[in-house]
């Protein structure tokens, strides 16, 4: 961890929180208590659900542990209320980089109950998942998850500091090692399970250390957008692999998708993949501040429509496809989302600090981002093209049936789908592709 970048990051967050408190002045609090979260167990079981710290807590500290708190006050060094229970069942130690100790005051506590004494001199606003628990502990007058405060903080999460950008770059570099190992295993005939394990081993992580559950989909499974299985069937002959997998560095997650083929993939599908790769690179090359993310999505739909027409998959022009929302049959998701502490990061629809929301357009309800592109934003660009029977079949009998080349589509369905995804930083005049390098 770069000490200078982390120190500057903490100073930036301190300024943001002080501004957020001023913006929320009518709520009568003079500090913010950020809670990492609490452990949960599966229903009727004593086995714990894998823990994930609250995004606003991880924004400050790379500590993925329950019952930690950070107290932010105006013009004072942030105070990390570092709860380390006395326990012989689990390892409760937390390794902290030296620069963390320099940037925040660390107060070691042995139980959550001791937090009350540490905040007794303040009137804090609590943000986190346990408002009832902390109200009982700190008093019924505790201001919990105030809308104005969270609106301000969520909105500013879209703008990344140099420290955050460095973590995202590192997360991309490591994830690419995993993608290389995954493709090698796929080309060698490995199962979805084998490919998944190869990815984890190359990144040197456990499954629950990844920023999200890896999507490892072979052949027709690649047309299931969030395919969740890892099949072990060694009799399957590999044609197509869609792998959507990332890596987490100090809380920041990369989100990369690659589609690979073997020599046995359908030749038109291979050309479709080449076309989709070209579309993704062209979209990234055109990114710069001042462009609406919605417009990027619309351009994506048009480019995919042109590609489908050029390969004879559809028999009509791009305008007809767009007018009747038929491209969405092949690409039903959005072109991407905000990226950071959360893979689908907060405030993708939020237009200002007041919390004004711009919803996804009616023609693309699954789009996750409607903001204008601005410097220091990080987001994904991930055009996709799939042969999804659930979406295609209704059109065999619809008024648009003649616009589809059903003979060719039937040949392509077994190949599944394509998605190409990179992580993009908006710069002052253009963009930086964190996954591939400069654009």
Image: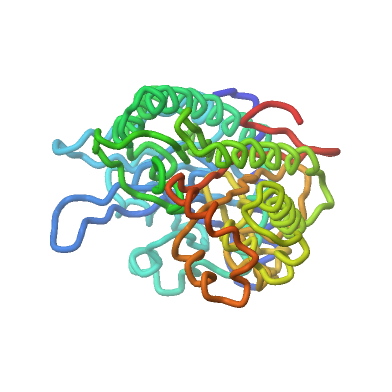
Instruction: Locate residue 436: give its quadrant.
Output: top right
Query: Residue at 36% across / 70% down in the picture?
Result: 132
Q: Nearer the viewer, residue 276 or 147?
A: 276
Task: Name the side, left or right, on which 24 lies relative to 59.
Answer: right
Q: Nearer the viewer, residue 111 or 315?
A: 315
Q: Nearer the viewer, residue 264 or 128?
A: 264
Q: How many marks?
A: 0
Which quadrant: the N terminus?
Answer: top right
Which quadrant: the C terminus?
Answer: top right
Query: Residue at 38% across / 57% down in the picture?
Result: 116
Residue 432 locus on image (x, y percent): 73, 33
Task: Name the side, left or right, on which 209 lies relative to 245.
Answer: left
Residue 395 in view, yes or no = yes
Residue, far front: 407
Residue 391 locus on image (x, y percent): 50, 65
Compared with 322, 423 (above or below) is above
Residue 11 in view, yes or no = no
Residue 20 locus on image (x, y percent): 66, 59
Q: Nearer the viewer, residue 46 or 370?
A: 370
Task: Name the side, left or right, on which 236 lies relative to 372.
Answer: left
Compared with 166, 64 (above or below) is below
Residue 381 locus on image (x, y percent): 65, 45
């Amino acid at each position: 961890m770069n000490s200078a970048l982390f120190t500057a990051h903490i100073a930036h967050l301190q300024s943001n929180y002080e501004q957020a408190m001023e913006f929320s002045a009518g709520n009568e609090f003079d500090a913010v208590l950020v809670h990492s979260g609490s452990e949960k167990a599966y229903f009727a079981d004593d086995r714990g659900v894998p823990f994930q710290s609250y995004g606003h807590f991880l924004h400050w500290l790379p500590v993925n542990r329950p019952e930690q708190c950070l107290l932010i006050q105006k013009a004072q060094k942030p105070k990390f209320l570092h709860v380390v229970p006395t326990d012989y069942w689990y390892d409760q130690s937390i390794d902290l980089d030296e620069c963390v100790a320099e940037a925040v005051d660390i107060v070691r506590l042995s139980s959550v109950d001791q937090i009350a004494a540490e905040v007794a001199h303040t009137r804090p606003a609590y943000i986190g998942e346990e408002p009832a628990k902390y109200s009982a502990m700190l008093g019924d007058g505790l201001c919990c998850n105030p809308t104005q405060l969270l609106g301000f903080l969520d909105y500013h999460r879209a703008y990344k500091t140099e420290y955050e950008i460095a973590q995202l770059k590192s997360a991309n570099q490591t994830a690419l090692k995993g993608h290389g190992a995954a493709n090698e295993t796929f080309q060698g005939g490995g199962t979805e399970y084998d490919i998944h394990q190869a990815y984890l081993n190359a990144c040197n992580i456990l499954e629950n250390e990844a920023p999200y559950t890896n999507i490892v989909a072979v052949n027709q499974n690649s047309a299931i957008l969030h395919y969740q299985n890892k099949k072990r069937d060694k009799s399957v002959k590999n044609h197509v692999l869609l792998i959507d997998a990332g890596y987490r560095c100090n809380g920041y997650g990369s989100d990369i998708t690659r589609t690979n083929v073997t020599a046995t993939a359908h030749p038109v599908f291979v050309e479709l993949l080449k076309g989709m790769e070209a579309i993704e690179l062209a979209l990234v090359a055109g990114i710069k501040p001042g462009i609406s993310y919605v417009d990027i999505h619309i351009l994506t739909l048009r480019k995919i429509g042109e590609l489908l027409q050029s390969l004879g998959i559809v028999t009509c022009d791009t305008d007809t496809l767009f007018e009747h929302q038929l491209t969405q049959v092949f690409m039903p998701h959005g072109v991407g989302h905000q990226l950071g502490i959360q893979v689908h990061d907060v405030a993708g629809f939020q237009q200002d600090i007041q919390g004004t929301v711009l919803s996804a357009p009616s023609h693309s309800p699954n789009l996750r981002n409607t903001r204008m592109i601005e410097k220091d934003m990080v987001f994904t660009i991930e055009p996709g093209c799939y042969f999804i029977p659930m979406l295609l079949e209704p059109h065999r009998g619809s008024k648009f049936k003649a616009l589809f080349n059903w003979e060719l589509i039937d040949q392509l369905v077994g190949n599944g789908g394509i998605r190409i995804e990179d992580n993009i930083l908006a710069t002052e005049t253009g963009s930086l592709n964190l996954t591939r390098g400069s654009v």
